[in-house]
Amino acid sequence: MPSQALLPQEQAGGLEALVAARRVRIDRFRELGQDPYPSRSGRSHSTVEAGAAFLAAEAENAAEGIQGVLLAGRLVGAIRRFGGSAFVHLQDGAGQLQLHLRRNLLGDDAFAAFLDLYDIGDFVNARGSMFRTKSGEISLAVDDLRMLAKSLLPLPEKWHGLQDVETRYRQRYLDLITSAESRERFVKRSRILSAMRRFLDGRGFLEVETPVLQPIYGGGAARPFTTHYHALEQEMFLRIADELYLKRLLVGGFERVYEICKDFRNEGIDRTHLPEFTMMECYWAYADYQQMLTLTESMISGICQEVNEGLTVELEGRTLDFSTPWRRLTVRQAIQDATGIDIEAHWEDLDGLRQALRELNLACAPQPTWARTVDELIGEYVEPSIWNPTFLLDYPVALSPLAKRKTDDPRYVERFEPLIAGFELGNCFTELNDPIDQRGRFEEAARQKASGDDEAQPLDEDFLRAMEHGMPPAGGLGIGIDRLVMVLTGTMNIRDVVLFPQLRQR
RNA sequence: CCCGACGUAGCUCAACGGCAGAGCAGUGGACUCUUAAUCCAUUGGUUGAAGGUUCAAAUCCUUCCGUCGGGACCA
């Protein structure tokens, strides 16, 4: 047996010894004329299909009929050896199934080879017949076992799993192998995305792609990542939003468009922010923000119903209720409820608003403009007070350079944000399509930038030219996909819904 | 960027100024229905890195690296 040959390497100790022992086994496979990394494999059933087939046959008293089942997957957990037999679980993309290996079924040589040459973590083909153990677990009695891919490094321990947060992010594959919960969360993320695409496709929206690298960034307030494009010898920005390009498509005659893509914002990381995040933006010509509101409500509640088979989600021990209709609340009312301040009493009066804050002893980081101060009040006092899905409506025009004014009160714009679990899930407004008003708002933003607001958007002449050719009235909506996945999966940290969150390079 | 906590065997964790340990995994052995298998034996360490204090440092101090939490910045 090859175990004799392991002794010298064993003295090396630690991980090196574990790897050295497995390398010896790879050599042993080759000495036996077997390829430890064969190109061909086979499969007749997934683990779940095999279990289902067995149950169906058992119901007809024909359980012996399930023979010649060929599984493919990874050995996981622990090998439970009993001299002449052994148990181990095989995990594939669908689930797990227990394998029972017996000397009298496999033969002496094959059984010895299993004990000596196979490790937890290896990919194998296992062929056999289905049966139920004495303790009732549906299992495969293996009559042929083949190596598909020998592993060199050990998997995390079976009982505690992978606890180290950093390793879970840096080596996500280990997290996925050992944590069914994590695996299911990412499966659900995928289902949420496909449900959203089905919803939008079903309403006549066209999925499009727009530039990630942009010569001028816009469509939001954020610091961008910058890069240099050598061939054109010019500075470029990674997009902070795709809004201005999607609107160009409205100008071009597409009436319903959407894009699901990564946006990049050069800002800090916390439970609800990552510098690289996924956004869905959609634009609907001839619709306004009220129609978009209905669309948002039915889309998100519909997705929740579809992926969770219900309208409630448990998050941090509390219940989120996605039943429609969601609560509606104006910005003015929400700020008044949360702080006692009526923003109309200090309209576009930065000093007056600051004075009111001081009088009420409200902690609020100093902001360079009136608009940013109102924004700060929403972020500090309104958002944390919201739990169930709520539409925050009607923002002051100074906060929203791309939104259309309300016809009955031009101090405000037709805009809402859906708030859930203390944070904003998205942003929506009736899009500004008056090119003269749009130019004025850009110029106002440029003045704010000059007066210290380094997040204000730069003027985009090319976009203005598009709008000057005529843009239909439209509603536009953006939904933060990562945050949507958080609330629909009951996850309180955005890093747990992103497969490979950014970490500092080590 | 600031404050705090943490970093020990492949994994999960002890030891908190006095010989660096356990469980799991691994290795050798017993065992043909286990599922955290059991039993016997056993390998495995630059205690994140560098420096300092001390007779003696995983432990105390300094700097650096990394992660987490909070703040700052920020949708």
Image (cartoon, rainbow, N blue to C red):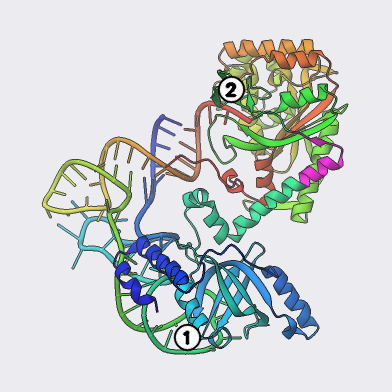
Residue A199 is inside the magenta segment = yes
Q: Which badge, 1 or 2, is on the more N-terminal residue?
A: 1
- In the rendered image, the quadrant that contains the N terminus of chain A is bottom left
The picture places residue A163, in percent across and down from the top left corner, at 49, 57
Which residue is at a point 53% across and 36% down the rendered structure image? Answer: A269
Labels 1 and 2 in the same subunit: yes
Vertical comparison of A26 with B65: above or below: below
Front residue of A311 and A186: A186
Which residue is at a point 78% across and 39% down the rendered structure image? Answer: A327
Vertical comparison of A197 with A412: above or below: below
User: What residue would you read off at disc 1?
Assistant: A83
The picture places residue A144, in percent across and down from the top left corner, at 59, 78
Q: To which quarter of the image does residue A271 belong?
A: top right
Residue A258 is inside the magenta segment = no
Vertical comparison of B61 with A427: above or below: below
Q: What stretch is highlighted in magenta?
A: A195-208
Q: How far apart are marks 1 and 2 (CA)?
A: 66 Å
User: What residue would you read off at disc 2?
Assistant: A236
Which residue is at a point 61% across and 47% down the rendered structure image? Answer: A497
- In the rendered image, the quadrant that contains the C terminus of chain A is top left
Q: Is residue A282 visible?
A: yes
In the structure shown, which secondary structural element does the residue marked by tag 2 occupy? strand
The picture places residue A482, in percent across and down from the top left corner, at 65, 42
